[in-house]
Image (spheres, helix red, strand yellow):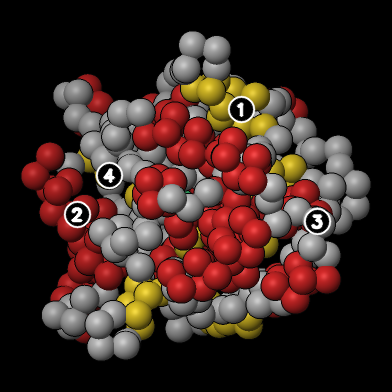
Amino acid sequence: MDYKRLAELLFPDVTMTPEELEEKYPPRNLPEGAKVTRFAPSPTGFVHIGGVYQTMVGERLAHQSGGVFYLRIEDTDAKREVPGAAEGLINTLARYGIRFDEGAAIGENGEIIDRGDYGPYKQSLRGDIYHVYAKKLVSEGKAYPCFTTEEELRALEAVDKKAEVKSREWTEETEAEQKAAMRRLREFTIEDVERNLAAGNRFVLRILADGDPEKKTPFTDLVKGKLEIPENDEDFVLLKSDGIPTYHFAHAVDDHLMGTTHVVRGEEWLPSLPKHLQLFRYLGFKPVKYMHIAQLMRLDENGSKKKLSKRDMGANLNDYERMGYAPECVAEYVMTLLNSNFEEWHAQNADKSYLDFPFSIKKMSSSGCLFDFDKLNDVSKNVLSKLSADEIYKGTA
Ligand code: GLU
């Protein structure tokens, strides 16, 4: 197949090259060892306390190393987007003293603006950029279009989801059948593509996976430790039929162009890591370091550990002020969860801010920390006891 011709057919409007983009977003000029981290929330609701936990890790790593900490809004799923959520989360994090050096920010009229040279920092504004790399992958035979009717697309989407979940009903046979069906998607001619395009049919772009899942590569996650990661053999979607990237594709392109060195994200992304490693390799990007953070846990009525879900008390960051906890108290408490030696350090350095604490990745727990209101109350008492009556009255804390 003439891949160059295929790429031209699929992306006739893309004239920019990856080289031009690399030039536009050159490597950051930072001292040796400086870390570039980001918080990359999807604007789908309130800030979860677990989000603050992750944010603080990113913030500490960047600022302790003389690096950059930035905010990227991952708004590629319009259906799940909640109006005003992006603005809400920026304002909430600001009250918690979380300082972004660059990225999405709030402008004078309350709108989201870009601050920094590596934007746009809102994924919905980066469509042209993703298409440049999509075209490159097609022209190298590493990605291919899949024209399907809406109905077929929905069925395939279900397959993608199921493959990720690997639910119990998913037997080896159905898996083999599915794999064969997926492989058949790879079989098409340039003429098929021309005919589909002429008929106005839309396509999703899939990666042409070359991995062997039986082969495992050693991989070190900075929180989880040494892992064995299987190669990816799933032709997962890079661009949806409306041209919008999936999380996987946007993650690789954005974190590369924005110069991220350390990706701090929830452990729910760990199963997708084989996909990301494959994408970085296909795109010729320098791999980033990963830190997969476990979800915060709570104790249920029977004393067993459960994930602190969205609906649980304490999940929504906005609730704390309503419950009477000053952001500084909550932030200090989160610090105690991050590094167990924080309290000892703070006792010895009572006059210092929690932002002066020498945070260490090595002291982080690789499994979920227990969120506990009694402990939060304890920490809060401590913080408040150091303030003058005047400060408390004015709400300085
Ligand atoms: N937008 C993704 C989420 O909300 C971010 C994951 C990441 O940090 O890469 O889960």
Q: CA distance from mark 2 to mark 3?
A: 55 Å
What numbered label is drawn on residue 119?
1
Up the image or down, 52 lies above or below 87; here it is below
Nearer the camera: disc 1 or disc 4: 1
* Apparent side of residue 344 relative to residue 205 in the rendered image (left or right): right
Q: CA distance from mark 2 to mark 1?
A: 33 Å
Tag 2: residue type? Leu
* Apparent side of residue 167 relative to residue 250 in the rendered image (left or right): left
Up the image or down, 120 lies above or below 380; here it is above
Query: Which element is circle 3 on?
Result: loop
Q: CA distance from mark 3 to mark 1?
A: 34 Å
Q: CA distance from mark 2 to mark 4?
A: 10 Å
Identify the mark nearer the N-term, 1 or 4. Answer: 1
Do callouts 2 and 4 mark residues in contact (Cβ within 8 Å)?
yes
Nearer the camera: disc 2 or disc 4: 2
Q: What residue sits right under mark 4 in the picture?
A: 146
Nearer the camera: disc 3 or disc 4: 3
Q: Is mark 2 within 8 Å of ligand 1?
A: no
Q: Confirm whether residue 343 shows in the render.
A: yes
In the picture as drawn, the residue positioned furthest to the front comes out as: 389
Identify the mark nearer the N-term, 3 or 4. Answer: 4
Quarter residue 228 falls in: bottom right
Query: Which element is circle 4 on?
Result: strand
Instruction: Please rate how many residues cluster around mark 1, counting C-alpha atoms within 10 Å: few if below 14, some from 14 to 19, many from 20.
Output: many
Tag 3: residue type? Lys
Q: CA distance from mark 1 to mark 4?
A: 30 Å
Nearest to the observer: residue 391 or residue 311 = 391
Identify the mark nearer the N-term, 3 or 1. Answer: 1
What numbered label is drawn on residue 352?
3
